[in-house]
């Protein structure tokens, strides 16, 4: 079975998540709410006129600023680990992906949807 990480969850992914929630003993309504929230986040465009220049401007210009940015992400993600696991994951993974995007951008790499999907899968399996 092939599962595409772009966009909202597929029927196969929804079935897998439902089975996983049952196996973990999670409340079905809460698990479905998380899936709906994730679908809403996944449906937001990655780029658009409102963001043009905003992301580039947010990329640190020198190595010291980049190191400070990475340290700040590490501190924030460490603090988020205090949340319940499912909430922590929902907060930490997007922040890690944003940090990877910004580090790549600072080094001249433009990440597209495929790169972000690969990063997301690797972070989720870590």
Image (cartoon, grey):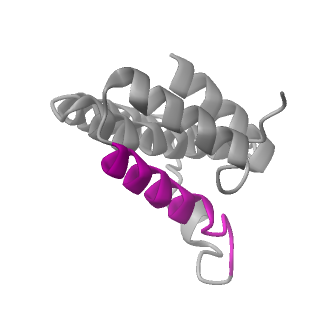
Q: Residue furthest bottom?
A: 49
Taking the magenta stretch, the answer to whether it contains residue 10 is no
Q: Nearer the viewer, residue 58 or 15?
A: 15
Asked if 39 appears above or below 14 in the picture, the reply is below
Q: Nearer the viewer, residue 118 or 18?
A: 18
Q: Nearer the viewer, residue 31 or 74?
A: 31
Which range is magenta?
28-48
Task: Say which quarter of the image contains residue 89.
Answer: top left
Asked if 64 appears above or below 6 in the picture, the reply is above
Q: Position of residue 101 (x, y in %)?
A: 60, 44
Confirm whether residue 112 shows in the render. no
Q: Residue furthest top?
A: 126
Quadrant assignment for the N terminus: top right
Task: Say which quarter of the image contains residue 31.
Answer: top left
Taking the magenta stretch, the answer to whether it contains residue 47 is yes
Q: Which residue sits at x=71%, y=49%?
A: 10
Q: Is residue 45 left or right of residue 88?
A: right
């Amino acid at each position: 079975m092939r599962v595409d990480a772009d966009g909202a969850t597929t029927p196969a992914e929804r079935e897998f998540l439902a089975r996983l929630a049952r196996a973990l003993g999670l409340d079905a309504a809460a698990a479905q709410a998380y899936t709906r929230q994730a679908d809403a986040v996944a449906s937001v465009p990655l780029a658009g006129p409102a963001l043009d220049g905003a992301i580039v401007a947010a990329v640190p210009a020198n190595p010291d600023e980049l190191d400070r940015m990475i340290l700040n992400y590490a501190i924030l993600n460490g603090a988020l680990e205090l949340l319940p696991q499912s909430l922590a994951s929902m907060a930490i993974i997007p922040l890690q992906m944003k940090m990877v995007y910004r580090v790549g951008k600072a080094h001249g790499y433009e990440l597209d949807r495929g790169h972000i999907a690969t990063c997301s899968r690797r972070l989720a399996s870590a």
